[in-house]
Image: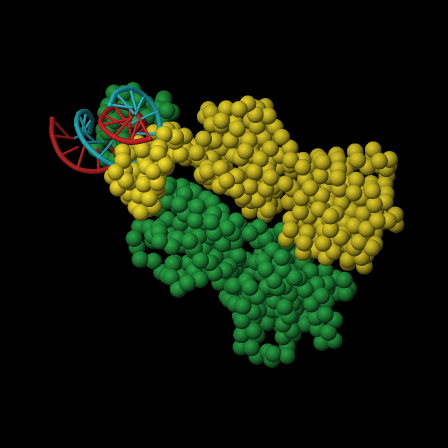
Chain colours: A yellow, B green, C cyan, D red
Amino acid sequence: MVSIISVAKAAGVSNKTVSRVINGEPYVTEETRERVEKAIRDLGYIPNMAARLIRSSRSNTFGIITDYVSTTPYSVDIVRGIQDWANANGKTILMANTGGSSKREADIWKMFQSHRIDGVLYVTMYRRTVDPEAGDVRIPTVMINCRPQTDELLPSIEPDDYQGAQDLTRYLLDRGHRKIGYIRLNPILLGAQLRLDAFRKTAADFGLAEGDLSIRLGMEGPVGAEKNYVFAVATEMLQQKDRPTAIMSGNDEMTIQVYIAAMALGLRIPEDVSIVGFDDFRTVSLALKPELTTAALPYYDLGLEGAELLNSVVAGNKAPSSRVMPCKLVERTSVRSV
Amino acid sequence: MVSIISVAKAAGVSNKTVSRVINGEPYVTEETRERVEKAIRDLGYIPNMAARLIRSSRSNTFGIITDYVSTTPYSVDIVRGIQDWANANGKTILMANTGGSSKREADIWKMFQSHRIDGVLYVTMYRRTVDPEAGDVRIPTVMINCRPQTDELLPSIEPDDYQGAQDLTRYLLDRGHRKIGYIRLNPILLGAQLRLDAFRKTAADFGLAEGDLSIRLGMEGPVGAEKNYVFAVATEMLQQKDRPTAIMSGNDEMTIQVYIAAMALGLRIPEDVSIVGFDDFRTVSLALKPELTTAALPYYDLGLEGAELLNSVVAGNKAPSSRVMPCKLVERTSVRSV
DNA sequence: TTGTAGGCGTTATCAT
DNA sequence: ATGATAACGCCTACAA
């Protein structure tokens, strides 16, 4: 492998001068710089990060720990956001996933340490509380899409489920809907309660009575093996004599069944009933016809901001302990004004 | 940072002895070993990979390059497969994504080299041909879910779209379906032609005439901005006087619209029409009621096998140049026998 | 079975 | 503005 020394020899300078050129340090003549750069190109020299790390003890590497990568399809956009940030800022990303095993998580922390990473992004694929194995170690950590179970004050970045549901509810109210159904997300998801609260509060503030709201549970049970009542619940809701003019559901996936239930009853969307989802899982929201109005989880931004935040923590800037990113309302064609 | 030397001092042995213990080399008394291990625990020593790499020039690290088109949600299972393999085999994963930019791809190759990675897994999120920037560099590379555009012979691992579609077609034929509709995937996807060929060939071999098959194009145009005819096409198909008893569609996402089209026409699934998909996007296939019979893309296995293959290439074992993984038929309840 | 010396590719220090 | 030399943490080779 061609090293800094071969370059130095080829350029007729010392290794330190080559080092200066590589790192853009001052005190190098333009002429010398060019000579060195030519040698670098000619020899195809590429700096050895490992050697650099050994000397400088800054790896410029962040580790990502994820849990269940595939249950929540678009959540990997978090990782994409992190990677893009890293790419733009010359950082390297080491990635590992626990698959839910805490032994594996412990191993991962160890592996990260053996690479002397500068910080960890602890990422969950759905919003929840966690108990990171960091424990004794004192590696700067930022939680993304989750928060510590204990009252440790690790900085965290989460989606604003409340605001998202609030915006959707207002959107329906603004379009004249006064009887609204809500099919609840699995209560064990952290976002479920927030979304429901936002729905209730927003409707109440607007002046709707509790009786104008049909609120029903759509799913429950452990993630990945939940019981699913959505189709039945939606069907019942739509068969009421005083049926809602709009149905909001916990997420887009549940919405598929609301669509099917409505169509099975011969109701047209949005003419007979308006529907909104949550999450903006595009495999669903764009595939449904009419396309679904929903609130997009800001996965990509969570990653981007998380990386940025971790960077400032690593740099020693005291960082805000916790932060929330907005869910953007995506207007499509599943709602009409009444 | 606590190094091998501090451990040696604490245990009252030489650094080399500590090194022996760490690497499980022979010729260490049980007693010495224990003393060293205790020192390691007490001091919280963790080996420095960078230092190790500098000496031994084997990084035990694989790089993953992805393109990350987020239209194919479950394809990240490829990455999960790779990670699991890496975890089980003590390898580290460096990950980066090109976002489609070839400048960025070139940067990534450089970054990988500067970490002296042992090999690269070149992963695409949907099956296609690619032209990796590897170029001059001679890093062992395995392509996953894609193949080189040129006739270079990089080893590759791809899903067996043909077999998957064949199995689905047979499944329908075996259940008595003799009029079958097929809604084609976007032709620019590599799998599209294979799936269609398999459908045609299997039906023909079974004895169906071309007239028993309704084949229509469902989507076309650039990935991420395609034109979508599925709903219209499915509606037409189901309105024919001699309508198919079963419809197979390019993928699960398209199937949502087939369901909706069928229901809008008052047809029940599977009583009036049977439906199968492809891909097994569980956000769709499990959310649809009745749940969808489909063929699962072997994403996880692609990753697992790809990593395994890369490992053997790196080890110098001459490897099979190309390989295909089966798509497993997942039977649910969207098909009935006629 | 254990220890010593040297070197891997960098950057840091201190001269020049 | 540039260079000589040490040092980082580990492993290899060889010696004891």
Is residue B298 in sight in this rendering?
yes
Residue sitting nearer the eye, A305 or A27: A27
Is residue A6 in sight in this rendering?
no
Residue A75: name its quadrant. Answer: top right
Residue sitting nearer the eye, B218 or A105: B218
Q: Position of residue A184 (x, y in %)?
A: 72, 41
Residue sitting nearer the eye, A299 or B336: A299
Whether residue D11 is situated above or below residue B184 in the rendered picture = above
Q: Quadrant of the N terminus of chain A?
A: top left
Q: Residue furthest right?
A: A241
Q: Position of residue A157 (x, y in %)?
A: 60, 33
Q: Position of residue A78 (x, y in %)?
A: 56, 41
Instruction: State left or right for residue C10 relative to residue B87.
Output: left
Residue sitting nearer the eye, A314 or B330: A314
Q: Position of residue B122 (x, y in %)?
A: 44, 52
Instruction: State left or right for residue B273 relative to residue A205.
Output: left
